[in-house]
Amino acid sequence: MLKRALLASSVVLALSSCQSMPTTKADDKPTSADADQFVTELNAKVRKGYAEQASAQWLSVTNINSDSQLVAAKVNERALGDLKSSIEASTKFDAIKPALKPDTARTLHLLKLSTSMPAPKDPAKLGRLTELATKLEGAYGSGKYCRAGETGNQCRDLGKLSEVLAEHGDYDAQLDAWTGWHNVARDMRGDYQEFAGLVNEGAKELGFADAGEMWRSGYDMSPADFEVEADRLWDQVKPLYEQLHCYVRQELTEKYGEKGSVGPMIPAHLTGNMWAQQWGNLFDQVEPYPGVSSLNINAALEAQREAEFAKAKAEALANASKQQRSELTPEELVEAGRAADLANAKLMTRRAEDFYVSLGMPQLPASFWDKAQFTQPRDRDVVCHASAWDMNYQGDVRIKMCITPTEDELSTIYHELGHVYYYLAYNALPPLFQSGAHDGFHEAIGDTVVLSLTPKYLNSVGLVGTPVQSKEAIINEQMKLALDKVAFLPFGKLIDQWRWGVFSGRIQPGEYNKAWWDLKAKYQGVAPAVTRTEQDFDPGAKYHVPGNTPYTRYFLAHILQFQFHKALCDSAGHQGPLHECSIYGNKEAGKRYWAMLQKGQSQNWQATMKELTGTEQMDASAIIDYFAPLMGWLQEKNKGQQCGW
Ligand code: X8Z
Ligand code: ZN
């Protein structure tokens, strides 16, 4: 988060209140020059206050305890209050809007949208809001599932429970892990309800109908047009998702019998993922042509970790032998394991950095390697949900992750470094322009790079064996990617359908959970295998709800990344099908990408989009074209099936 407006619920611009803003005499009409000066001072204030806020937030999520939470909530409270004052002060320029310079007008517009957590003016309510925000994120981060009689370390966190879901096979163990985690969120219901009410109040004070409308206002078009646009994109990709759903449901029923589906829907706990958002972990189970090619990089990552473990043990043994011991104590062994986890996590991150550097982007600064959180600390609770941070607008960039040697995590590192390189590229801009062209752009940068991790590239860095070239191999590859990228689309869309409904009042607290599962059914065709009631608060089991991070950005990113990939492959001179393209090492593509990143949000996203892709529109035809071979295969395979739900 702070990751500036990224995962940034709590992102906040530190603006100190209006007392030191440029003043105009009460009866004087402000001039355009006054507005320019206001914006200059505003940017200076944001810059000045930023690092302290970033540090407070960083501490609160990398060491969750009552002290770090108190400080984060208080810093946030001050920052949101200051932001409110600045927005109020800026309204004096409303009357002369047509006379303002474009950059000044854009800055004032962006100022109003610079947080996803607008606060009410009432100081008591503001304080309560930041307290709840910190509490909800902390509850998610420290959430554990304890079975009867389990305490302390026996209880499992999200990471452990997710492992159970990823290692498919045991229906009951999976259902237990799924239910256990979802029940952690029950306690969040009351807090979330109160939180949503306060955020809404803040949004209304700014002139929006509700917080949902405010979130939809960040796309250089009217919020109503944006809603239509998002629906249009979903309609474009829905047929592809329906075919994938049909095939996977069939495979699950073959494996689990009648438990493999819930009516026409896929059981929520059987997709290899806690939220059924990415199904890549099912690949082994649903591989179209088993054994044709080895696409599994988990084995190579695990072997790399083992090698680090061997090194760490050898070092520890060398030390022990100085004390005349020939064996390691259990503590030393645990310590060596931790050292190996960290060393391996850094190697994985180096691998990702190397890709960006191959495009001509800079190496990450030394401080990144010192200050990032790569692995899960064992002595304290942290928010493991991955995030990328700009701590000071001048090069102190970090990621916060709990990296394990898996393919999912490797992709997430590339994703997070996409954010980090965006920060570095636009750091030269005034703070209020330092954000993605829109938030979907920010989420798409690293994912676009991941599309270049072709079997040929992965083989060149020793992560998979020699790639097989055949029609069957292509279908396997496409299936593997589609399980993550296509399966994600309805999920990416529905989260904010729920939140927009909550904010607008269309979804009332008494039906929070029912509305959630109605949307899961409508968009994903996914259903819980056990009864859920209004005792439950299943939306709270997904980070971005307690973390207050808008989610439509990820839906958009999953469309955009294919558009970006196509544009970059074109500039790299790639010939042939898009799925064969890797821009690794291509400086021309890198130069164009970097140029886009440097623009930040200094101009509307349509202009930035046009510079890279030649079009001003988001459009799903790139993802549809990309998966054309798989779509054909699925349609053939699903013939005679009753698809849909
Ligand atoms: O939250 C994230 C990133 C951090 S911005 C790890 N993602 C979404 C999620 O995990 O739900 C990336 C894909 C979707
Ligand atoms: Zn992200």
Image (spheres, helix red, strand yellow):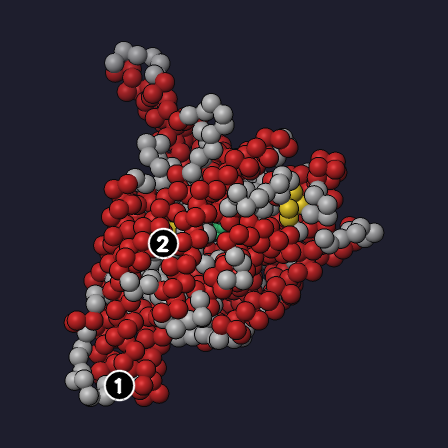
Q: Which of the numbered marks, if any, corresponds to residue 187?
A: none
Q: Position of residue 566 (x, y in %)?
A: 56, 64
Residue at (31, 50) in percent of width and height: 131
Which residue is more in the foreground, 387 or 172? 172
Disc 1 packing (10 Å; few <14; some 14–19; many ≥20)? some
How many callouts does the rendering have?
2
Q: Is residue 135 visible?
A: yes
Mark toward the start of the polypeptide (2 vs 1): 2
- The image shows residue 404, relative to residue 590, as above or below, that is above
- The image shows residue 582, relative to residue 114, as above or below, that is above
Residue at (42, 43) in percent of width and height: 140
Residue at (47, 39) in percent of width and height: 184
Which residue is more in the foreground, 272 or 300? 272
Q: Is mark 2 within 8 Å of ligand 1?
A: no
Q: Is residue 255 left or right of residue 230?
A: right
Q: Is residue 414 visible?
A: no
Which residue is more in the foreground, 190 or 480? 190
- What is the three-letter code of the residue carrying label 2? Met
Q: Is residue 294 left or right of residue 337?
A: right
Which residue is more in the foreground, 4 or 146? 146
Q: Is residue 401 left or right of residue 251?
A: left
Q: Position of residue 521 (x, y in %)?
A: 64, 52
- What is the three-letter code of the residue carrying label 1? Ser
Which quadrant holds the N terminus?
bottom left
Q: Which of the numbered marks, if any, corresponds to residue 32?
A: 1
Question: Which residue, given by chain and number where applicable, does mark 2 sit on?
Answer: 1
Farthest front residue in view: 510
Q: Which element is circle 2 on?
A: loop
- The image shows residue 129, relative to residue 429, as above or below, that is above
For marks 2 and 1, give the CA distance.
34 Å
Residue at (29, 65) in percent of width and height: 121
